[in-house]
Structure formats: structure tokens, C-alpha cells
């Protein structure tokens, strides 16, 4: 069973960005897309006022691990029940949507938005991806 998951919050007053460090695979997609928002070496590392809400939403929706998510008042009630999966070349299996995951110990964890599952076998946080595939040179 996982310990209580840490979630950090950053807001611009209208949009709240959530970051779950334990889910982050450090792919750098956030810093590539919006370098004016994400400053990994600073605290706080997210400057939500440095981009428009549509820019932030577009970038967060592209987060490969689902470590970044958001809440925006204007979107309340727009939940999707569809679950999709995508295999990333040389990377994790991404599952999009909300679903229950039964762990090997029988505990059930509810996953939301995006979940990155390890395909390389080297993750120290199985079944989740921790970006070990980048260090091992995984191909698949």
C-alpha cells in the first residue's frame, strides 16, 4: 500500500494546478511547452500567472504521467467516463481516465486523469513509471 500521496497546489486565482511528485516521470514536457511557467530549480516552481488559462490547460493535458492536473471552475461537471490506453515508444503505458486499480496486496487505488505504468521493468515504484526506462535505454 502506498503512503498518503503528496499533492502540491499552485493557482492564478481562477485555475488551480495540482502536482503529484510521486507520479512525475520528469519527461520535461511542461518546461518545454511553457518555460515561463515552470522553473524546476525554484520554489515555488510553478508560476501560474505567467500563461493564459487555455495555454495552461493545453499543456497540462499533455503531461505524459498525469502528475499535473487542474481544476477550473468553468469546467465543473465535465467528467468523462471513458478510459483509453496509449503505449509510448520506448516509454510507459499511459492510461487516461478514472479507474480503480487493484494492487497485488488487494488494496484498491482510484486513478484519475492519466496514469503511467512501467513497461521496462526497472521502475522502483512499480507498477508506476519512474522514468527508469530513460536510464536503462529501454526500447519497446
Image (cartoon, grey):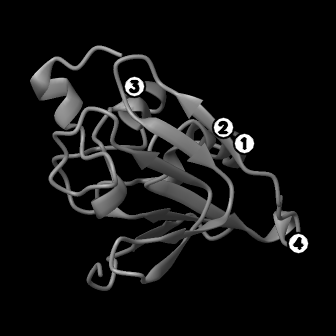
The answer to whether the residue labelled 3 contacts the one labelled 2, judged by CB atoms less than 8 Å apart, is no
Position of residue 104 relative to residue 66, above or below, is below
- Tell me: 81 left or right of 45: right
Q: CA distance from mark 2 to mark 4?
A: 19 Å
Closer to the camera, 1 or 21? 1
Give residue 12's position: percent from left, percent from top: 57, 64
The number of discs equals: 4
Mark 1 or 4, closer to the camera: 4
The answer to whether the residue labelled 1 contacts the one labelled 4, judged by CB atoms less than 8 Å apart, is no
Give residue 20's position: percent from left, percent from top: 38, 64
Q: CA distance from mark 2 to mark 1?
A: 6 Å
Q: Secondary structure at mark 3?
A: helix
Q: Secondary structure at mark 2?
A: helix
Q: Determine which residue is flagged by label 4.
A: 77
Position of residue 134 relative to residue 45, above or below, is above
Mark 2 or 4, closer to the camera: 4
Give the residue at the far left of this rendering: 135
Q: Earlier in the sequence, mark 2 or mark 4?
A: 2
Closer to the camera, 100 or 97? 100
- Taking the spot 11% from the left edge, 27% from the top edge, the residue there is 135
Name which quarter of the figure residue 103 lies in: bottom left
Q: CA distance from mark 1 to mark 3?
A: 16 Å
Q: Is residue 60 visible?
A: no
Q: CA distance from mark 3 to mark 2?
A: 13 Å
- Quadrant in which the N terminus is drawn: bottom left
Q: Determine which residue is flagged by label 1.
A: 54
Q: Determine which residue is flagged by label 3.
A: 32
Q: Determine which residue is flagged by label 2.
A: 58
The answer to whether the residue labelled 2 contacts the one labelled 1, judged by CB atoms less than 8 Å apart, is yes
Q: Earlier in the sequence, mark 3 or mark 4?
A: 3
Amino acid at each position: 500500500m502506498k503512503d498518503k500521496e503528496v499533492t502540491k497546489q499552485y493557482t492564478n486565482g481562477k485555475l488551480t494546478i495540482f502536482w503529484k511528485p510521486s507520479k512525475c516521470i520528469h519527461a520535461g514536457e511542461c518546461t518545454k511547452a511553457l518555460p515561463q511557467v515552470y522553473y524546476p530549480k525554484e520554489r515555488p516552481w510553478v508560476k501560474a500567472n505567467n500563461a493564459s488559462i487555455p495555454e495552461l490547460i493545453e499543456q497540462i493535458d499533455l503531461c505524459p504521467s498525469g502528475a499535473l492536473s487542474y481544476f477550473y471552475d468553468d469546467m465543473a461537471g465535465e467528467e468523462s467516463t471513458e478510459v483509453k490506453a496509449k503505449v509510448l515508444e520506448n516509454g510507459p503505458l499511459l492510461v487516461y481516465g478514472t479507474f480503480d486499480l487493484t494492487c497485488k496486496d488487494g488494496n484498491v487505488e482510484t486513478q484519475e486523469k492519466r496514469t503511467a505504468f512501467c513497461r521496462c521493468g526497472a521502475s522502483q515504484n512499480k507498477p508506476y513509471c519512474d522514468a527508469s526506462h530513460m536510464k536503462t535505454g529501454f526500447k519497446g
